[in-house]
């Protein structure tokens, strides 16, 4: 319903298909267009220069925080450093969501951080349950926890139909990062 700005939503973009972060960033552009401030908290994306981070750094009213060690997290061998980096990202996300400065907060790859036990799902639920009424929060990443899906107002599952990875092609600059 138009004009329902005071009713902040919890949105989850999950699934094995491409486009979860892209959808969240599209929402960020839309929010910016309507004068909202946006914060993107990246989980497990600490070192790489992602194209969207380069572009966002040139825009007003959007900030981001990124934590995570160089390289990928091994879900079979999560390190204390991996957990510490996830906690740092969660703290930045909490400050953004609860601080009163942002209308939209994106928690990029938080679903994976929860699934791989870098964060407890209860701490994420606590964050979304305590957000101000006018703040929208988007949670992205595969493996969304059922508890987060139940708390969400909107859930979209991206379904992979076809991807160049299946042909052995690597990530493409400007498309995948």
Image (spheres, rainbow, N blue to C red):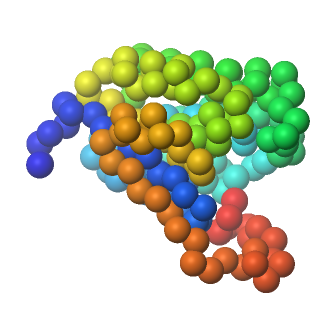
Residue shown at the point (33%, 48%) measured from the top left: 154
Residue 112 vs residue 146: left or right?
right
Q: Tell me if residue 140 can be seen.
A: yes
Give the mark count. Answer: 0
Residue shown at the point (67%, 21%) measured from the top left: 87
Q: Residue 13's x, y, as percent?
A: 47, 52
Q: Nearer the viewer, residue 21 or 75?
A: 75
Q: 68 above or below 11?
A: above
Q: Quadrant of the C terminus?
A: bottom right
Q: Nearer the viewer, residue 176 or 125?
A: 125
Q: Residue 35's x, y, as percent?
A: 30, 41
Q: 152 above or below 18?
A: above
Residue 172 vs residue 58: left or right?
right
Q: Tell me if residue 57 can be seen.
A: no
Q: Residue 174's x, y, as percent?
A: 67, 67
Judged from this view, the residue extending furthest toward the bottom is: 167
Q: 82 above or below 165?
A: above
Residue shown at the point (68%, 64%) measured from the top left: 176
Residue shown at the point (45%, 36%) measured from the top left: 148
Q: Residue 170's x, y, as percent?
A: 81, 71
Q: Quadrant of residue 150?
A: top left
Residue 158 vs residue 136: left or right?
right
Residue 6 vs residue 44: left or right?
left
């Amino acid at each position: 319903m138009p004009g329902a700005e005071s009713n902040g939503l919890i949105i989850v973009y999950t699934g094995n298909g491409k486009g979860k972060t892209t959808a969240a960033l599209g929402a960020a552009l839309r929010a910016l267009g309507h004068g909202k401030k946006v914060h993107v908290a990246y989980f497990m994306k600490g070192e790489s220069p992602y194209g969207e981070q380069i572009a966002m750094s040139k825009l007003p009213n959007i900030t981001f925080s990124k934590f995570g060690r160089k390289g990928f997290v091994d879900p079979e061998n999560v390190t204390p450093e991996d957990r510490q980096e996830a906690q740092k990202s969660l703290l930045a996300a909490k400050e953004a969501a609860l601080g009163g400065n942002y209308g939209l907060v994106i928690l990029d790859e938080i679903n994976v951080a929860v699934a791989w036990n870098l964060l407890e799902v209860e701490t994420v639920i606590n964050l979304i349950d305590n957000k101000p009424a006018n703040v929208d929060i988007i949670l992205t990443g595969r493996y969304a926890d059922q508890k987060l899906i139940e708390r969400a107002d909107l859930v979209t599952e991206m379904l992979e139909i076809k991807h160049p990875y299946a042909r052995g092609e690597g990530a493409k600059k400007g498309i995948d990062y």
